[in-house]
Amino acid sequence: MRRKKIPHPKPGKMAARIVRTAKQGNAVAEVENIVVETAEKIFADLANAQTINHDTKGSWKAPLWQALTEAGLPLSWVPEACGGSGASLAEGFGVLGAAGRFAIAVPLAETMLAGWLLSQANIASPEGMMTVAPCGPKDRITLGTDGTLSGRTRGVPFATDAKHIAVLAQGSGGLSVALVEASACRIEHGFNLGGDGNDTVTFSNLQPIAIKPAPKSFDHTTLLLMGGVARSLQIAGALETLLDISVRYSNERVAFEKKISKFQAVQHNLAKLAGESAAALAAATSAADTIANFKTFDDAVFLEAASAKIRASEAAEKGAAIAHQVHGAIGFTLEHILHRYSLRALAWRDDFGSESYWAVELGKMVAARGADELWPLVASR
């Protein structure tokens, strides 16, 4: 029986309607819930993991992206004045968590981040898929005196699929935000562990469509932290689904005439997986809440965001191993949906700085502040 189609209103309009009718504190939570529920309905209707697994041609992507676009979700973080939905940061973070739970393999997170970056410089966001660059700590894109962009950046997610790229470029006068056509760049196609685009993009004296100075408080680390929190939420969401799939399978699989969920070793592993999932979710949502409620990316935001990326990445490694151990050989087959979540959770560890990179940077920040400042900073969170 076919599902009845559910209309997906734009989150910005939903938020405005509810805020006008209620000024209590719980009204904000109600708005966020509606936005997340809208995303989850779209994912459930058009991004069922088993259906996608059997669709070798990728015909599911266009209807999914169309529904997401009609709901205004890809441009959630873009103000209405810049062509977006005008949703809050908290609403957008909720959507990313839902996307992680469904292991969405379209550039939703990347388009949201690109729109957010462009909005920092009041550049209007175009329609269609976007991605953001640079995504790595060591990569830099330079702005020449003639206004052109040059540089090479690796690990750009979905660059081949994107129509536009939002770029953070370094010039003699400081940082600038630019919008470029992806077709004007030289793109070397690659894949991450989950089979999604992970490309190398080269800018060779490229003239951007639009370019404006970035805010004075904005830097490359700010972009990496925002992207890191987005990936942490996606990892946490994928781990939630890995736990659910593993528990369900353990209650179905019979060995030695009893369900494997009755074996103490399996129970112990599932408890560890639940702990890793909870830790990743707690760290990621705490970082997202901090960013949503702080006006600047100060030391408190750095501590939360870096810690979230570190903890979520560690949880992905441990959680994926446990989930596959519970499933045994069947979990490694292409026919099973488990790999859709485990491999993407592992792949997302490297985006916007790996856990080892952020561990070093966090150590530098703590050392610079001094031993006497460590406990007050941690306790304040």
Image (spheres, rainbow, N blue to C red):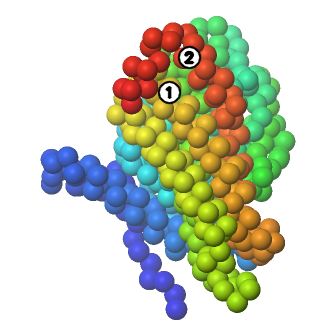
Q: Crowdedness of circle 1 by 10 Å Cα count: few (<14), some, many (20+)?
A: many
| 86 with respect to 129 (left or right) | left
Towards the viewer: 219 or 172: 219
Kind of residue sitting beneath label 2:
Met
Image spot of residue 108 (x, y percent): 57, 52
Q: How many numbered tags mark residues here?
A: 2
Residue drawn at (50%, 58%) of the image: 98
Kind of residue sitting beneath label 1:
Leu
Towards the viewer: 294 or 45: 294
Instruction: Using the rendered view, name the quadrant where residue 378 is placed.
Output: top left
Q: What residue is pinned by disc 2?
A: 365
**Does 187 sit above or below residue 17?**
above
Q: What residue is pinned by disc 1?
A: 303
Image spot of residue 141 (x, y percent): 71, 23
Image spot of residue 295 (x, y percent): 37, 26
Towards the viewer: 238 or 77: 238
